[in-house]
Amino acid sequence: MPSYSLGVHLRFEEDMVAFSFCIFDGGQQETVDMNAAKERGWRGKFTKPGRVMRPGAIRVNGKCPLTPLEVTAIL
């Protein structure tokens, strides 16, 4: 029988979420807040010409932190 494990990162805070480049269905306000947090932390590093971030692909590949609601559903 296979065994599974789940790692839970208990620090679901603005800077961690912003730097993950994931989308968490927070709508337009989330986009504005996360862009502001990225700019405070990286000062334009990820808005350089030619730099493309694909949040949808990051989420599909399982590289986004789980939201507290998702962790609750799994447990």
Image: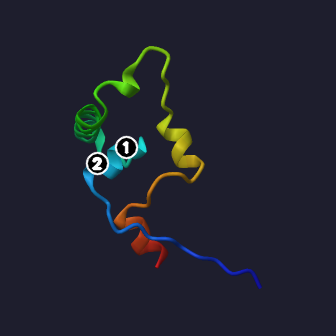
Q: Nearer the viewer, residue 32 or 63?
A: 63
Disc number at residue 33?
Answer: none
Q: Are marks 2 and 1 in contact (CB under 8 Å)?
A: yes
Q: Residue at x 22, y 39 (%)?
A: 33
Dot 1, how many residues are within 10 Å of its Cα: few (below 14), some (14-19), or many (20+)?
some
Disc number at residue 15?
Answer: 2
Q: Residue at x 47, y 38 (%)?
A: 55
Work out whether 13 lies above or below 3: above
The single residue placed furthest to the right in the displayed view is: 1
What is the secondary structure assignment of the residue under circle 1? helix
Q: Residue at x 26, y 31 (%)?
A: 39
Work out whether 21 lies above or below 11: above
Q: Quadrant of residue 18?
A: top left
Amino acid type at mark 1:
Phe
Q: How many marks?
A: 2
The single residue placed furthest to the bottom in the displayed view is: 1
Left or right of 12 in this view: 7: right
Q: Quadrant for the N terminus, please.
A: bottom right
The single residue placed furthest to the top in the displayed view is: 49
Amino acid type at mark 2:
Asp
**CA distance separating discs 2 and 1:** 6 Å
Disc number at residue 19?
Answer: 1
Dot 2, how many residues are within 10 Å of its Cα: few (below 14), some (14-19), or many (20+)?
some
Q: Quadrant of residue 21?
A: top left
